[in-house]
């Protein structure tokens, strides 16, 4: 008598989007959190990625470990990712929405956060390393009438040499709005806001 056993292993993804913390950038900004330029990778899943997905993960997503970033996968290893967002929450949401173009359900495979990362509290905003470079080291030639606006999705704008402060603020907001993500219709609105500039 022979008894055969078959073992089947499938990747089960949640039936809905992953649970995401809804921390939104709101005015007035009370504190701007900045970090050192390079981030650290936090792998959230032990799944082995197939060659095409692994190549995108290694060569595109991990290149320079640019925070804030997230890499999401479908059960068939379709993927979506983002780097350079201004918050971890936004990176998770953007990567998930990009991934959902490849399949009905996605999970976050990995994230890139800065060393020393702490979740945002109300009134706080964070920035990608690129935006933080302009915030923490403004050029002295920019003068007094300057402004900076950022969006959670990674958009930012710095303007200078304007007349009244309101004119600089309006210009920064307008320019920043032109760089926000507009090709993911189910992504929540992530408007640009003004931040206190040094």
Image (cartoon, rainbow, N blue to C red):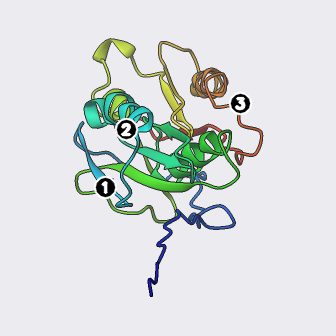
User: Of discs 3 and 2, which sits in the foreground?
Assistant: 2
**Nearer the camera: disc 2 or disc 1:** 2
Q: Is residue 194 above or below residue 92?
A: above
Residue at the outermost bottom position:
1
Q: Earlier in the sequence, mark 3 or mark 2?
A: 2
What residue is disc 2 on?
Answer: 54
Label 3 belongs to which residue?
182
Q: CA distance from mark 3 to mark 1?
A: 28 Å
Q: Which residue is mark 1?
A: 42
Q: Dividing the image into 4 quarters, which one contains the C terminus?
A: top left
- Is residue 149 visible in the rendered structure shown here? yes
Looking at the picture, tell me which residue is in the foreground, 174 or 120.
120
Secondary structure under the numbered disc 3 in the rendered image:
loop
Judge by depth and name the residue closer to the eye, 64 or 135. Answer: 64
Q: Secondary structure at mark 2?
A: helix
Disc nearest the viewer among 3 and 1: 1
In this rendered view, identify the residue nearer to me: 139 or 41: 41
- In the visual, does 100 lie left or right of 1? right
Q: Quadrant of residue 44?
A: bottom left
Q: Residues within 10 Å of mark 1 (few under 14, many from 20)?
A: few
């Amino acid at each position: 008598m022979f008894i055969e056993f078959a073992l089947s292993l499938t990747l089960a993804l949640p039936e809905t989007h992953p649970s995401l913390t809804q921390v939104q950038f709101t005015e007035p900004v009370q504190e701007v959190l900045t970090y050192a330029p390079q981030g650290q990778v936090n792998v959230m899943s032990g799944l082995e990625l197939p060659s095409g997905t692994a190549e995108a993960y290694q060569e595109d997503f991990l290149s320079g470990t640019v925070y804030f970033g997230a890499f999401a996968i479908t059960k068939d290893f379709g993927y979506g990712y983002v780097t350079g967002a201004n918050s971890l929450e936004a990176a998770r949401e953007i990567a998930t929405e990009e991934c959902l173009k490849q399949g009905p359900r996605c999970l976050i495979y990995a994230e890139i956060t800065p060393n020393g990362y702490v979740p945002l509290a109300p009134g706080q905003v964070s920035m990608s390393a690129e935006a933080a470079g302009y915030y923490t080291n403004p050029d002295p030639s920019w003068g007094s009438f300057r402004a900076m606006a950022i969006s959670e999705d990674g958009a930012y704008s710095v303007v200078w040499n304007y007349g009244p402060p309101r004119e600089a603020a309006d210009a920064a907001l307008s320019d920043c709005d032109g760089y926000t993500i507009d090709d993911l219709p189910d992504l929540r609105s992530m408007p640009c806001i003004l931040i206190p500039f040094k």
